[in-house]
Amino acid sequence: MIEIKRLDAHEAVLLVAAARERALEIGVPMCIAVVDESGYLLAFQRMDGGKIHSIQVAMDKAFTAASARRPTHELADLSQPGSPLFGLNVALGGRICIVGGGMPLVVGGDVVGAVGISSGTPAQDRECAAAAVAAFAKLLER
């Protein structure tokens, strides 16, 4: 039998709030998705002014970070022509996202979920995702 660590719904809502807070601080309305370890949606918010297309992109970034077990920005170089993961971005019907803004949530070496942020620049999206990851780390300290 395999035991699986999993982010819960309450934690997911707290992570959305942390990302939202950072988005408000930088003045960029975001779409914020939090998924479980399998990449399935636990919580989502489209802030007022968040881009329509960013709804799916945020969910895809979170899915990618959970399934690849690494931040989405790390996949960008690896998926270019001649690189080991070339073509990854078209896998699964284009659901794999190699743009920054998706980050896994890790506990004891196990990915328990992920966050995906979209609507700003990749750097802004990463900044808000990092705020959610930092909030998750604080939750673990309790």
Image (cartoon, rainbow, N blue to C red):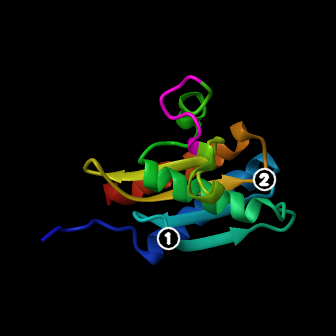
User: Front-most of 102 and 90?
Assistant: 90
Q: Main secondary structure of the magenta part?
A: loop
Q: Determine whether, in the image, residue 27 is placed left or right of residue 79.
A: right
* Label 1 crowd (10 A; few <14 / some 14-19 / many >=20): some
The quarter in which the C terminus is drawn is bottom left
User: Magenta includes 87?
Assistant: yes
Mark carried by residue 119: 2
Dot 1: element: loop
Q: Residue 86: image x %, image y %?
A: 56, 34
User: Front-most of 16 and 44?
Assistant: 44
- In primary-sequence order, the first of circles 2 and 1 is 1
Point 39% across, 60% down: residue: 139
The residue identified by callout 1 is 40
Magenta region: which residues? 82-88
Q: Amino acid at mark 2?
A: Ser
Q: Is residue 86 visible?
A: yes
Q: Amino acid at mark 1?
A: Tyr
How far, Cα to Cα, is label 2 from label 1?
A: 20 Å
Dot 2: element: loop
User: Front-most of 37 and 131?
Assistant: 37
The quarter in which the N terminus is drawn is bottom left
Q: Quadrant of residue 60?
A: bottom right
